[in-house]
Amino acid sequence: MRNLSRWHMGLLVIVGIGLFFLATGYDAGLPLYESVDERHNLDEIYILRGIKDDPLWKPGYPPGILYLNYGAQLVTEAITGQSAWDQACMVIQNVRITGIVANLITAVLIALTARKLGGDLAGWLAPLAWLVAPRVLAQAQFGFPQVYEALSYVLALYLALLALEHRRTRHALLSVAAGLGGVIFKYVTFPALGLGVGAALWNLLRADRQNRKRWWGVLALQVIAIALTAIALLTLGGVGSLAGSGHVETNAFLSDGFAKLVDTELVGYIFTNVAGQIGLSLLVWSALIVVGSVLYWRQAALWQRLGWIGTVGLGLLHALLLAMYIFHLDGIDRNILSSSGVFAIIIAVAAVSIARWLADRLNRPTLQYVAVSVFAEVWLVPQVIGAWDWVQYRSLPVTYAALVEWTETTLPQETLLVNDNRPFIRDWNCVNYLPREIIWDADLMDQPLESWLDQGVYYTVLAQSRVEEMRATPAGQAYLNQMTLLEQFPPPGQEDQWRSWRRGEEAAVMVYQLWPSEPEIETDIVFLDGIELIGGNIEGNGLEPGSSVSVQFYWEAAATPHADYNVFMHLTPLRDPSNILAQDDGPLSRIDLRTTSTWDEPGEIFISDTFELVMPHDLQPGQYQVSLGLYNWRTGERLLTNYGTDSIILPVTIPTE
């Protein structure tokens, strides 16, 4: 009993290590989706619930992950009292948390199964190897269906072993039920059904006449359950429609799935990654399985031998099935996650079997523990280091997530010109930010800056590579010189302290405003209420009858103004200031951007729209003045300058021709 308690305490420590690795950074990347499948699964339920009016992405897709997302949406709505649409980030978090719990249950089942086959040492080694494998960890933190496929495989295997060992009908039935649960998440999980059916057949063959009828009944129930599930998926689940939906993996399986089984390069690539996902080379992985199987066969009881055949067969069959339907080879880690737990069991039991054989051969019982410890150290220390590096990486701030948050909290709700629109649209972002028009299919240099400004485009987000391309040409550098760099992600010199968005094509991005921060003409005119006119840009062809002069003002806030002010500009005769001959007025900052009462950042620079004075055609030569000032647009009351005047007077002379 004491040994049993010690083993369970060791397992508890291992599960705690797994929880640390899985939970650290589980919500990293949000509010941006790091997987297209997370987004699709979320959207499918929005569509089925009528929240979103779009066609289904993948009609007939295994419904298990959709049920899970549906439950996550209902839980989120119950907790927040808000629509799942408005709380999409919490829905994703709930799905990921559920996945973490499923992974921990899988780890416990891996331990129980390995212990059942190979003893206490294998029962510790297998779950630890699985939980600290970086390539497993990188996939297990997301709410992918493969997480539940892995759980189904190991659960079906464990229950089949119990059916072989104890010859109990309920274990064989539950094994098939576990396999069917996996099929609901991923159709290719069907080999797991063979474990429970195989256990029932074996018990039927070995049963006496009295018990044979009972095992026939078990087989009948298993077949009925499988048939009913298949009918439900074909009719209610619409699995048949998946073939014509454009789903690439289904089409790959139907078109040339069997031909891929003889593609030695593809099969070799898959098995290399199957071994690599748990930290082994293909050569070492293969040798352990072959040698371990031979030695295990000599040591194991009959039911364990049958269980070993089922375990190895299940893992190898899944890898071969993967060759028949895999389409995106760069996403192979997610697909082989399903059988990674099975292979962790196989390698752990094989290693313990070899160590046990060495100990028996040399007649030194303690050598078994030494050999397993050395193997575990060589195998798992690099894995633990890799797992630690992964969680550290996941905890780093994400460039695109920081970019979106900064943009939405700092920049006005205006049109934004970007090189990659995905972070800013709801399809890739789980936050309901204020609506903002995004232009992403045009290059900044296609138009002059003034053309963009005239269209209401005041800011642009450029990838660092695009900025470097512009800097490499005189025209591009001149264009950059007309703009102001507002923010850069990651900040210069901190590149190793940030990580890029998983879906982002660029590691660094920059935000520019489409005008320079420094005015052509500098001034030092202070108005009360914390507003300073620091300069301006002037364009025009002189003060002549029929001509015009354009002025753009640069303002700085020393403190937050208490009211919203407009600027006015009047042309009047010098001796008759009430006779306004030309005028223009409007907000100090660009139209619809920031009213003065929102200038809450001391030292921030604000730039106005262009104000224009159009000279009358009948303007006579003489003495005139341009009056410039601020007024409260609600009350009309003018704001005084620090000189005590309500405007600044600029005398001008219209000469005689």
Image (cartoon, grey):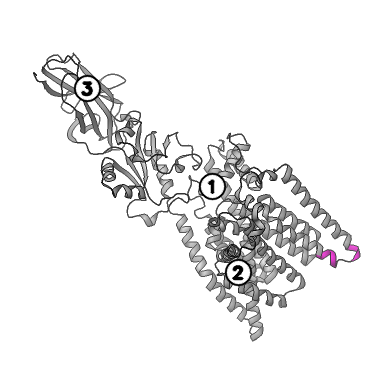
User: At 32% across and 42% down in the image, what residue appears?
Assistant: 512
Question: Where does the image place residue 28, in percent across and percent down from the top left?
Answer: 48, 50
| Residue where numbered disc 3 is placed | 613
Residue type (three-letter) at the residue carrying disc 3: Leu
Residue 86 is a magenta residue = no
User: At 17% across and 28% down in the image, what residue appears?
Assistant: 642
Residue type (three-letter) at the residue carrying disc 1: Val
User: At 65% across and 59% down in the image, what residue appears?
Assistant: 259
Q: Sort mark 3 into few (<14), some (14-19) or many (20+) by Cα contacts within 10 Å.
A: many
In the rendered image, the vertical position of residue 463 relative to residue 363, given as above or below:
above
Prevailing secondary structure of the magenta residues: helix
- The disc, 1 or 2, on the residue closer to the chain's N-terminal end is 1
In the rendered image, the vertical position of residue 62 relative to residue 136, given as above or below:
above
Q: Which residue extends farthest left? A: 656
Question: Where does the image place residue 160, in percent across and percent down from the top left?
Answer: 74, 62
| Residue where numbered disc 1 is placed | 36
**Which of the pair 146/163 is nearer the observer?**
146
Residue 137 visible from this viewpoint: yes
Lateral position of residue 39 relative to residue 307, left or right = left
